[in-house]
């Protein structure tokens, strides 16, 4: 038996063919007909089947404890649901709907996101739903909304082969979006005139094909982008016609970027002026100019400003709404985009409607037929755990994510779960750290054990077949949420199957900019489709804004002028180095899936600290020594790994590891801080002050 599916790791959204033999053994290969990956898979995708076949760490049955002093025990689904509904009802009656919250994941399927969002916003009456996408893409969401009028990625992968200059900043797609990068590499190999510019404090694998590597100091991204903007203006590479007719805000922007000389900007960024000029010349010469970014820009206390300063480069040059051009945020998770479509964050409503807009709230409330939607934005990811600590939030339901590794300054989240009155954990794995604090555990079905849809970074929707049965009594996440909603007595959760949920979501998009009404599983089983759905017969990827009409009130894109100063925790005498955290090639998030696969663990087996030899020698550290990394918040103890590829004064720690052999000294988020961007509420994972000493 064989089915087509989609890789459930990164936002690239590669198509896979999954085969099941008579013994039930699965194999996976890249789908040669898929428009994204054309048969290619990266190391994570090639090993997907192991994560499903290995059931050694799976949760099989619902569990519950009757009070915090008792151990959890196996119970029936009905008992677990009954108790959870009773506790939620009591808390909501006593403390109001904002006393409960759902914390979900960019790995949830669209149908799952949809029902969680509908439940809390439309029936419980709170907007307390946030997801780990807050830690990933929320700065890009705000950046797109502020500049283009809506959270709409204007480009698609086919633009890669139509571009002749790609500026990658705050991203290492060679490791984190490998198949997108294979396409870039192939394009450059076939067209040597294509220029690649990379801005990153580390010389990563992505730099291997870079014509210019701007090895900037962390936190200087806005200064860099402003300097590029200034040079483009001085070179005469502004698209004056586009700027005049289709944007607003240019004059103020021009004045602002002229305030810093190129020499000063280069010094602040820690790069050669000549390199900066070379990069600007490549952009100026481009007929198709793509900007690509991920967490280096988003995960910052000034993440929105970084996004806006980058999008401005596309706007002032008119490189948007035409083939091979545009600002392209590479989504970190497989369905962060689908979550945004259904409004699955604390400040959003379905189909890109705005929570603060009373007309939008009424439209959705009427459609759902539940309670009035509150105009008050809900708690964001980090706010949720602070509110638990303060006692303002009483219960949290955690779905498909492991915040005790992934949240910044993670001890806050640990304390929060200790203090919470009631914690529900819905997951596939019995290894997630949150289980220690769970009052109720719901076992969930994994990839290939349920059907549903996901949307990748280029707005492409894929259907995922169910191929195998979930182990024990595990259920699809959407089914778990609907059972709970029915137990709470809410109408509108009697879906016969996942497609009914999907059709409801599609209907709610009608007339919006992401209109996919008319789409269904029958179409999606045949082919992937990009939103908005204009024709199911499209075969090429499509870009947005080809008519140069943006989704703002004036239909003009907005060139925002933003301050260029960083607001992160600055190094000082006690903590003189800058820590940046990030991903490695063969691990995914908190390793609950990739950590099970021997082949993937062979790449890099344990956490390490990448440090420049000059910084290490100053501290008497040799390559491979155990080192203590400390901040004002905590400590990590890992092996030092020398690298001349990292800027002096900067150290890098991968974010994937949690507890190893009962020690949490591998966990990067012992060190990070709780600063967030004021608009996107995305944490500052890429910058905090640390000291490193030999252990
Ligand atoms: Fe999966 Fe991303 Fe690798 Fe594609 S690039 S196979 S989506 S992890």
Image: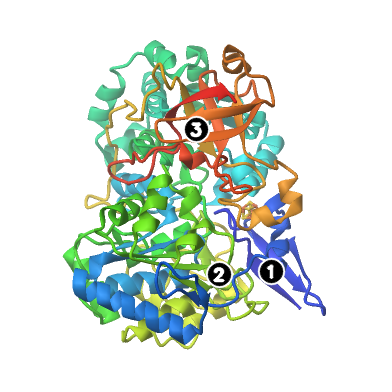
What SS does tag 1 mark? loop
Disc 2 target residue:
537
Dot 1 alpha-carbon crowd within 10 angstroms: few under 14, some 14 to 19, many 20 or more: some
Pinpoint residue 126: horizontal percent, then vertical percent: 25, 67
What SS does tag 3 mark? strand
Disc 1 target residue:
55
- Whether disc 2's CB lies below 8 Å from ligand 1 is answered no
Residue 188 in which image quadrant: top right
Pinpoint residue 85: horizontal percent, then vertical percent: 35, 80
The quarter in which the C terminus is drawn is top right
Disc 3 target residue:
580
First in residue order: circle 2 vs circle 1: 1
Residue at image point 32% right, 80% down: 86
Residue nearest the viewer, comparing 230 with 142: 142
Pinpoint residue 524: horizontal percent, then vertical percent: 56, 73
Dot 2 alpha-carbon crowd within 10 angstroms: few under 14, some 14 to 19, many 20 or more: few
């Amino acid at each position: 038996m064989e089915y087509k599916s989609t890789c459930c790791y990164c936002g690239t959204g590669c198509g896979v063919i999954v085969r099941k033999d008579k013994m039930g053994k699965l194999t996976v290969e890249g789908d040669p007909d898929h428009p994204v990956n054309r048969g290619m898979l990266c190391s994570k995708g090639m090993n997907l089947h192991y994560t499903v076949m290995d059931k050694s760490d799976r949760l099989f049955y619902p569990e519950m404890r009757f009070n915090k002093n008792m151990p959890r025990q196996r119970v029936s689904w009905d008992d677990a649901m009954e108790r959870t509904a009773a506790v939620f009802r009591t808390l909501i009656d006593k403390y109001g709907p904002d006393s409960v919250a759902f914390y979900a994941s960019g790995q949830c399927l669209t149908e799952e996101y949809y029902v969680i969002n509908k439940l809390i916003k439309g029936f419980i009456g709170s907007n307390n739903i946030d997801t780990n996408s807050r830690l990933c893409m929320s700065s890009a969401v705000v950046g797109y909304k502020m500049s283009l009028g809506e959270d709409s990625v204007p480009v698609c992968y086919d633009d890669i082969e139509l571009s002749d200059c790609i500026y990658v900043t705050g991203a290492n797609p060679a490791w984190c979006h490998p198949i997108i990068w294979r396409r870039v590499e192939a394009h450059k190999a076939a067209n040597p005139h294509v220029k690649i510019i990379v801005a990153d404090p580390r010389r990563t694998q992505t730099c291997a094909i870079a014509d210019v590597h701007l090895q900037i100091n962390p936190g200087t991204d806005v200064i860099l982008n402003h300097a590029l903007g200034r040079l483009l203006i001085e070179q005469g590479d502004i698209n004056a016609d586009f700027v005049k007719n289709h944007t607003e805000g240019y004059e103020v922007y021009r004045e602002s970027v002229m305030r810093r000389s190129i020499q000063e900007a280069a010094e602040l960024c820690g790069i050669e002026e000549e390199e900066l000029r070379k990069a600007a010349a490549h952009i100026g010469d481009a007929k198709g100019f793509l900007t690509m970014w991920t967490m280096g820009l988003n995960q910052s206390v000034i993440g929105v400003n970084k996004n806006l300063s980058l999008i401005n480069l596309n706007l002032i040059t008119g490189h948007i709404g035409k083939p091979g051009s545009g600002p392209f945020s590479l989504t970190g998770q497989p369905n962060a985009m689908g979550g945004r479509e259904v409004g699955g964050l604390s400040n959003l409503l379905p189909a890109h409607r705005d929570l603060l807009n009373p007309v939008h709230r009424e439209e959705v409330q009427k459609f759902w037929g539940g309670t009035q939607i509150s105009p008050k934005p809900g708690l964001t990811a980090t706010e949720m755990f602070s509110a638990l600590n303060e006692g303002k939030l009483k219960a949290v339901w955690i779905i498909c994510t492991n915040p005790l590794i992934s949240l910044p300054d993670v001890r806050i989240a640990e304390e929060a779960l200790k203090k919470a009155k009631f914690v529900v954990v819905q997951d596939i794995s019995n290894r997630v750290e949150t289980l220690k604090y769970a009052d109720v555990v719901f076992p969930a079905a994994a990839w290939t054990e349920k059907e549903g849809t996901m949307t990748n970074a280029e707005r492409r929707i894929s259907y995922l077949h169910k191929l195998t049965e979930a182990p024990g009594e595990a259920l699809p996440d959407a089914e778990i949420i609907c059972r709970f909603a029915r137990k709470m007595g809410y109408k509108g959760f009697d879906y016969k199957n996942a497609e009914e949920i999907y059709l409801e979501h599609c209907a709610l998009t009608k007339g919006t900019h992401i209109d996919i009404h008319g789409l269904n599983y029958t179409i999606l089983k045949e082919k992937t489709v990009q939103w908005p759905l204009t024709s199911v017969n499209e075969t090429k990827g499509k870009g947005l804004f080809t008519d140069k009409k943006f989704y703002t009130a004036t239909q003009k894109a907005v060139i925002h002028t933003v301050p260029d100063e960083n607001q992160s925790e600055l190094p000082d005498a006690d903590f003189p180095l800058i820590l940046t955290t990030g991903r490695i090639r063969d691990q995914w998030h908190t390793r609950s899936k990739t950590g099970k696969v021997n082949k993937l663990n062979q790449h890099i087996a344990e956490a390490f600290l990448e440090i420049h030899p000059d910084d290490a020698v100053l501290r008497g550290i040799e390559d491979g020594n155990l080192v203590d990394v400390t901040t004002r918040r905590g400590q990590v103890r890992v092996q030092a790994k020398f690298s001349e590829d990292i800027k002096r004064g900067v150290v890098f720690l991968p974010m994937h590891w949690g507890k190893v052999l009962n020690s949490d000294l591998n966990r990067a988020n012992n060190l990070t801080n709780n600063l967030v961007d004021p608009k996107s509420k995305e944490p500052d994972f890429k910058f905090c002050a640390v000291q490193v000493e030999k252990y």
